[in-house]
Image (tube, helix red, strand yellow):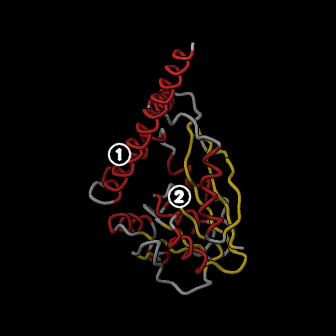
Amino acid sequence: MYNEKMQDKQGSSNVDFYNSMRKKWWARIIMWGFDLLYHQYSWIYDFAAWLVSAGKWNDWIRAAGWLVPKGPLLDMGCGKGILLQHAVERDIPAIGLDESPQMLRHSSRLLNERDLRLIRAVGQSIPIKAGVFQTVTATFPAPYIFEPATLNEIRRVLKPGGKMIILVTGEVTGSTLHEKIIRFAYGLFGFSRTPDSLQTYLQEPLRKCGFMGHVEWIAGPNARLLVIVAQPV
């Protein structure tokens, strides 16, 4: 009996280890793929976004954009400028920041010259004076957004009472064949559901850098979207 329990425990540990390693390697592959999409292969960015969201990627970004209040906005990792365009349509003055020259070129094509306010820089060193923005946003950002250097810079450029909004991830909920395939693929690699523990995990670096906020799910087209809303304290 003891041996059987030990074998069961060992077997369970092996499964947990395998699942953990599988997720880590899959996450690394995803990040490597994103880096390519933001740079050398930016020309297939739209197709990749369509593939993983069943064509709703830009709509997901706009759904998060409705959380942005009036007042100056800095969009970190602005990508192709979807949130910037949404802000302009709502008469919100916005600046886009991105490290990728390819992404900034895409943003410049989407926005007209009158609304063009783009900066090439990294989030860990924002070339803007302190206390400028009412809101700082980031949609589907890379892990850099949770680095202390980035969070400290966001604190610096926010106005008193300003807030940070981060669209972290989305879970497809639709019932089309494409959407079912997406859910199957995510489940295959252990990402079918976002664990509740992630919410606590994501808030820890925020607290360490002087932010207080909450994590919430909002509705998006064919999906539910995980969003962090936080303010400096």
Q: Quadrant of residue 102?
A: bottom left
Residue receiving disc 1: 29
- Asked whether disc 1 touches disc 2, contact meaning CB atoms under 8 Å apart, the reply is no
Is residue 41 positioned above or below 149 on the image? above
The residue furthest front is 2
Dot 2: few (<14), some (14–19), or many (≥20) neighbours within 10 Å? many
Is residue 91 positioned above or below 168 on the image? below
Q: Is residue 156 left or right of residue 106?
A: right
Is residue 222 positioned above or below 200 on the image? above
Name the residue type under label 1.
Answer: Ile
Q: Is residue 129 left or right of residue 100?
A: right
Residue 74 position in % (x across, y down): 55, 72
Residue 5 position in % (x across, y down): 56, 18
Sequence-earlier tag: 1 or 2: 1
How far apart, in angstroms, are the residues tagged by discs 1 and 2? 19 Å
Which callout, 1 or 2, points to the residue nearer the camera?
1
Name the residue type under label 2.
Answer: Thr
| Nearer to me, 81 or 167 | 167
The residue furthest left is 40
| Nearer to me, 83 or 172 | 172
Could you tell me which secondary element the residue under label 2 belongs to?
Answer: strand
Residue receiving disc 2: 139
